[in-house]
Amino acid sequence: DQQVKQNSPSLSVQEGRISILNCDYTNSMFDYFLWYKKYPAEGPTFLISISSIKDKNEDGRFTVFLNKSAKHLSLHIVPSQPGDSAVYFCAASGDNNNDMRFGAGTRLTVKP
Amino acid sequence: IAGITQAPTSQILAAGRRMTLRCTQDMRHNAMYWYRQDLGLGLRLIHYSNTAGTTGKGEVPDGYSVSRANTDDFPLTLASAVPSQTSVYFCASRTYAGSGQPQHFGDGTRLSIL
């Protein structure tokens, strides 16, 4: 039962363009959403998060948008850089603080 | 450099053997976690500990056990390894178990059960 889904296993964009990574969830009790970035042979690192009381959170080149009615969130990276090439995981947590659910990840490739 | 250290980095293990994956953090975080990462499934929570002396079961706890004798260490034990436990295992920690708190991850242990 995957409560957090990232339906695109991979995404390729040109350097300087926008990268949009998508995530859908099914559990309406989730109240916090996080994005992690993972390089090969390393652990995931926290990138940006958003509370369910907001619909947008921005940090430099990274912006996360939340559409609660659609149970959908997205991560925008503008402009994309080759160093952004990594696997991006979407995660969600709710009233059970220990039960953070992760999506399967999207591999982003930014071409120079 | 403060962070999470996992050992070993990788291991090949015969089925039926016992194995303990080690995890140590020096950030004085209260909460610690063990995940497994499998292709197409993302990270799934095995066990967690909200504070030293307490542990709890996650999404996929069967075949695994943990202990939290102190703040820094959170070992994961496979009592009798089976091939389906072949995976990459990540230990994580965070300041406390709050939904907005991001987790810090170690670099993982790649475990192959033959």
Image: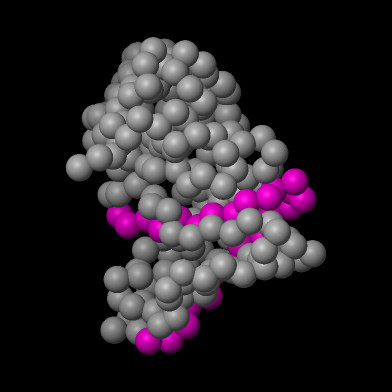
x, y (%) of residue B67?
43, 15
Q: Would residue B44 appear left or right of A108 to someone viewing this image?
A: right
Q: Is residue A83 magenta?
A: no
Query: Could you tell me which residue is drawn at 52 percent across and 19 percent down?
Result: B55
Image: B13 above or below A58 = above
Q: Nearer the viewer, residue A51 or B55?
A: A51
x, y (%) of residue B16?
38, 14
Please identify the quarter of the rendering in which residue A112 is found: bottom left
Q: Residue furthest left?
A: B1
Instruction: Say if residue B111 shows up in the picture.
Output: no
Image: B45 above or below A61 = above
x, y (%) of residue A55?
67, 68
- What are the residue bounds of the magenta stretch? A16-40
Query: Could you tell me which residue is drawn at 39 percent across and 50 percent down?
Result: A44
Q: Quadrant of the N terminus of chain A?
A: top right
Instruction: Say if residue A104 shows up in the picture.
Output: yes
